[in-house]
Image (spheres, rainbow, N blue to C red):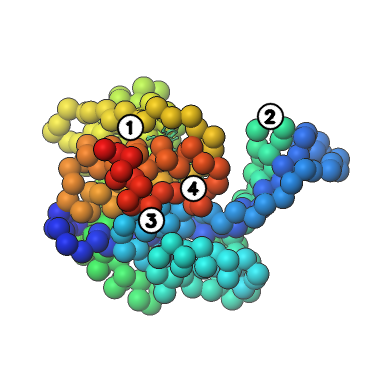
Amino acid sequence: MRHGAGPGGPASLAVFGSTNMDLVATVPTAPALGETVTGREFRTVPGGKGANQAVAAARAGSAVHMIGAVGEDEFAARLRATLGEAGVSTDGLRTAPGFHSGTAHITVDGKGANSIIVIPGANGTLKGIGAGDEDRIAHSDALLLQLETPMEGVVAAALAAHARGVRTVLTPAPTQPLPPELLAATDLLVPNEHEAADLSGRADPYEAAVALLDLVPEVVVTLGARGSVYAARGAEPLTVPAFPVRAVDTTAAGDTFVGALCTAYAEGRPMPEAMAWASAASALAVQRPGASSSMPERAEITAYAE
Ligand code: ADP
């Protein structure tokens, strides 16, 4: 990657991944099997880890290309608009004929516990990269990947980036086995502590971060309110604290962190500094309700980080 692309132009990032509409029902008590309950509230919230990372990175100041798919339905326009309003280019967001957009059907009960059904829809068609995507990737400083779309597409995108010397950043969520060809093409792995434990078999996040260096050259493990850990081959792991804040909604905290982290790193800032800036971005986001709507703008992040 062109780390240290230099002062001047913004970082240029490509995101390959999911775009979902979250359909959120708030109920006093979740229905048992066969039961019907009356809920309190219904909201539609644009999401998907791919789209969330794209919005986070664009708000943080990167020029972002989203590579993904929406369906032929009423959600597609709003999903495109949400990305567009954040300044994300949607030229690489295709419409999958005959498919619905990806949806997440979320039930939140009175105690805040949730149950979720995800229907991939158009996201399930992302089994490779399309016309124009190689260029979008080749002209980027980094490619951001997650695992909410079919693995073969994630691998194809990672290989395209790797072959062109474009840095690849993988958020391994939802956790699943990582094929060797994906690991070989991954420069930076950014799991949360649960994903890091699953992937490494180590409960301790520091040990997990170091163990994951057997698979990839650099790892950042996010620890929620306890901050994040950075490990790189040949260096001592280091911890960057989170900002002490009162969190009201931690939805997409990790995606906010990744979008800001990659923006700062692609601008040439050292990783610990990029992590601190990303911590500021996610601390701002968790103090407000919402997913991508709660993600801060660059100026706000910078002011808060100082
Ligand atoms: P994920 O959303 O993927 O589970 P984390 O919960 O680890 O990710 O959060 C990612 C980052 O967001 C953390 O490293 C931290 O900087 C910030 N963050 C998350 N929760 C809080 C919190 N309660 N207070 C302050 N910062 C937080």
Q: Amino acid at mark 4?
A: Ser
Q: Amino acid at mark 1?
A: Ser
Q: Nearer the viewer, mark 4 or mark 1?
A: 4
- Would you name the residue on which mark 3 appears? 59
Left or right, 170 with reference to 104:
left
Q: Nearer the viewer, mark 3 or mark 2?
A: 3
Find the distance from the CA under tag 4 to the CA under tag 3: 11 Å
Residue 217 visible at all = yes
Front in this rendered view, residue 282 or 91: 282
Find the distance from the CA under tag 1 to the CA under tag 2: 28 Å
Percent across and percent down for residue 106 are 66, 46
Q: Which mark is residue 294?
A: 4
Find the distance from the CA under tag 3 to the CA under tag 2: 32 Å
Q: Which mark is residue 111?
A: 2
For ligand 1, tell me if the residue under mark 1 lies within 8 Å. Answer: yes
Percent across and percent down for residue 165 are 19, 60
**Which badge, 4 or 1, comes first in the chain's sequence?**
1
**Which badge, 4 or 2, comes first in the chain's sequence?**
2
- Badge 2 local density, few (<14 within 10 Å), some, or many (20+)? few
Find the distance from the CA under tag 4 to the CA under tag 1: 21 Å
